[in-house]
Structures are given as structure tokens and as C-alpha cells.
Image (cartoon, helix red, strand yellow):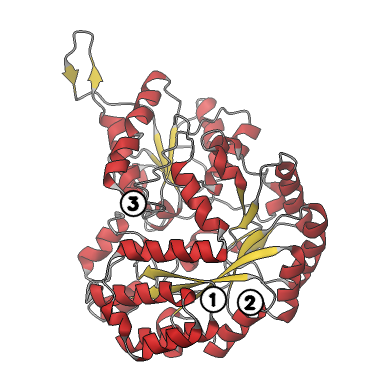
Amino acid sequence: MGAESLGVEYLSSVLKGRGHNVELLFDPAPFAGRLTVESPLLARLTDLRSKILRRLQTSPPDIIGLTALTDTFPWTAALAREIKNRVRETEDGRRETGERHNIPILFGGVHTTLCPRAVLEMEAVDLILVGEGEVSLPELFDNLQNGKSEKELPEGIYTNSHLNRPNFPGSPIVTNLDEIPFPDKSIFYSKIPVLEEHYMIISGRGCPFRCTFCCSDALKAVTGGKTYLRRRSVENVIEELRIYKERGRMKLVVFRDDVFTINTGWLEDFRRRYRDEIGIPFFCYTYPGTLNEVHADLLRDAGCAFVTMGVQSADEATRREILRRVHSNETVLRTARLLTERGIKLSIDHIIGIPGEMFQHLEDAARFYNEIRPHRILVFWMTYYPCTEILSTARRQGILHADDLRRAEMGSIPFRNLGGMVRERRAARLQFMLLFALLPLLPRSIATFFINKKLYRLIFPTFYLYNILLFLNAVRIKDTMFFHTIRYAFSRKRAP
């Protein structure tokens, strides 16, 4: 639901390579997925769930796979229940509601990996896949095709007979990523052709850092420990991109690696090959302190157009003690300047509502970002995801309670800047959110005056204004990623 999924594309490619037929049923949810434009009215008019159910009824598969993020888990779980309990029309027009749909349903994805027991307890779920699936999923399909018993399950795949297990080890992972076939982009591009304009790719898996609000630590424990951090060869990455460059539709390459700038030698080889053989502007993520002058030069020479850097808090003590991010503000400032001085657009991520946060921290952050002068500041409300370390901090401070943890396991948490779990003085925090969105639009001196005189308190706190400010700033900096999101929302889409 709601977005192109590299994980689904990789699994489709692996399964097709083993001779299995794969079809994607996808709800773009442009007005309900909480990823683009949120509109209940437009969401109802464009809802595709009935079409998805009808397609499953008229052309039933041998197995149904559902992938879930924590944020989309309620939608995914509801769909699974409807598949299992859907109402069928009888010949004389009467409705029967008790009929069960016996096609096995398999749940995978990040949320399943983090909360396997909670997902497996759902009546509509027959199987779960924990961790990466390139090894275990095709083995499962082969077993089903060959009539093997459900008791002969591959590693990382479980049924409700395993509910009493103390833990759920993940599927084996592929340590050499070059061995995995290129992702099957056709399953999404055939539904929404505009997606090909911004080609999503990943050159490595895993993150070397351990931020408390992120699931990286938990995923590392489940899916491979020390071998979790892996990277494809430059040759392998270039070969994939060359295939789609020849189609002539790519306008931007979007690298979704958690941190793109962690290996100088890899970047040196990439700079040369990418510039000479691909030559299309690209986007990537960096982390303060992982980018030096050499890295910045390599990114510029390769054709990097836009970089996002997570700062999350401008208070060093908060970053160090609450978020486990040990870099200094000076490091953040130096990293930002290395990029902006080379003409690379910089976007900064900031979290509002971190445990222990005071309004003085937010005002100090506004002054700090005014010094950095990034091209864009995106604000996210503190959201407590399952199995993250920051849950313990929030419990100790009385921010969360036991029922909140259960809600998180069931995906009952609002998404991104629509709310998170921030409960206290939301309107005042929203004013800071609007201030951060406004800063890139104002000259430095005017922004300083605005902050010092606390004029941000006069801003009417509404999310609509935040989106308007983001739109105005996108026009100012010619932000192709922002307008691609809008194009996605309103572009031509084919049946699920």
C-alpha cells in the first residue's frame, strides 16, 4: 500500500527466476497512504480494496503474500481479514458471510520481523516470514508446489503452531548481494508508469549506526548480526542502472541506502563509472561525520543533486543521551557546508517531541538551522516504533504505558508529521514545525529577527500551512523529488 517496495521487487525477481508466476496487487493510496496528499474524500473515491478483493476472487492464486510496515499494518491486517471472511454472492442473490477463504496468507516485511508473535496471533494469518526472504521464500514455494508438509518449513518461516516459541530467528541472508537478481521493477511500473522517472535503488543493506528511535539494531539481531551490513559491487549497481537508462525514462536516481557515504574506495570507483556510464542526477542519504571533503568532491563529480542528512535534534546532550547520536553540532555544520559549497542541495530531517525535549531546545534548533541554511527542513513527530530502544526511555519518563506498546505492535500509531505519539502542547510544537519549514524561505537576517522576537508564536498552527510552505520552498529550489510525489498522486494508474 502507498509506495513502491524494493523488497517486494526483489522477492518477485527471485521467485520468477525459480519458475513461479508472480502478480502484484497494489493500492497506490495517493490520498490515504499518509505518504502524499491526505484527503478522506479523495481516498474514498480512489479506494481500490474492492477491486483487489474482486481480482482475488476471479483469479485465485496458490498463496497470497502481504508486506507490512508498522504504519500500514492496520490496512494490511484488515485486507487479510476481508480476504478470509469476505462476503460472497450466491446464485439467488442472498449473502453468505461464514465462508472461509482457504488460500494461505503469508505476512512479511519489517513489521512482521519486529513483531512476529503479534502478527502470527491474527486469525487471518497462516504463515509469517521473519527477516529477508530471498532464500526462504522460494524454498517455501518449491515445497508447496512439490506437495511437502507444512511441517517442513524453511528457516525464518512460521505458522501459529510456533506461537509458544521463545524467539523467531530470521531467514538466512545473502551475504554477497551481487548474487541476488536485479529487482523486478515491471510489477510496479506496469501499474504506475511515472515511478520510473525517479528510479529507486539500493546499493547496500544495513546501517552501521544504532540510533535508539530506529529499528536497525533489532533487524540486525534477527537477520544476521555482523553480516547484516553489506554492499553491492559498483559494477553490479551500474549494470542495473544501465538497463533502465537505455529505456530513456529515468530523470533522477534515488539511492535508498541508510548511509551512502561510508566507503571512500567504493565512492571513488562509483564516481568514475556513474559519471561516464549513467550521468543522471542522483539523490542519497548521509550521516554527520561520514562525509569529508573527499566524499563531497566525489558526490559532486558523480552528479549528486540532492542529499538528505538526519540531524533530528540540535541539542548535543539530547542526541547523545536519548538518540545515541554522538556527533557534535560542529560536525553537522561542517558536513552541511561541504555539500552546499559544492552546489549540492541539502535537506535536513528533524524530530519534534523527543523525550525530555523543552521548547528552548526547539528555538535553539531554529537558530542552528538558520546558521546552516539548508535548502529544506523536514520535520517528523516522535513516533515510537516496536522494538526500538527509545521505548524504554519513554516508559521511564512516563510518556508511554503498557497499552501504548501493544498499540505500537498492532500499528495503531499515526504516521510522520500527522501526529506521532506527541501528546503535550501539540499546537506550540506545530508552530516550531512551521517555523522550520519557513526558515529556508527567509533571508538569514529576517529569520534571525523572526526567532529572536518569537514571532513564530503568531503562526496559526495547522498542517495545511506546513504543506503550503513545503510547496513554496519546492518551487524556490526546483525540488524535483517533491513534485514527483505530487505527480505520483495525480498520475495515471492502472487496475490493481
| Quadrant housing residue 10 | top right
**Residue 269 visible in this rendered orientation of the protein:** yes
Mark 2 and mark 3 lie on one chain; the one further toward the N terminus is 3
Mark 1 and mark 2 lie on one chain; the one further toward the N terminus is 2
Q: CA distance from mark 3 to mark 1?
A: 26 Å
Q: CA distance from mark 2 to mark 3?
A: 32 Å
Q: Position of residue 439 (x, y in %)?
A: 45, 77
Task: Residue at 38%, 62% (x, y): give it.
Answer: 468
Mark 2 lies on a secondary structure that is: helix
Mark 3 and mark 1 lie on one chain; the one further toward the N terminus is 3
In this view, the residue farthest toward the top is 92
Which amino acid type corresponds to the residue marked 2 in the rendered image? Thr
- Using residue 16 as the reference point, say whether residue 162 is left or right of it: left
**Residue 150 visible in this rendered orientation of the protein:** no
Q: Which of the pair 448/102 is nearer the observer? A: 448
* Residue wearing tag 3: 38
Q: Are marks 2 and 3 in contact (CB under 8 Å)?
A: no
Q: Position of residue 474 (x, y in %)?
A: 50, 62
Which amino acid type corresponds to the residue marked 3 in the rendered image? Glu
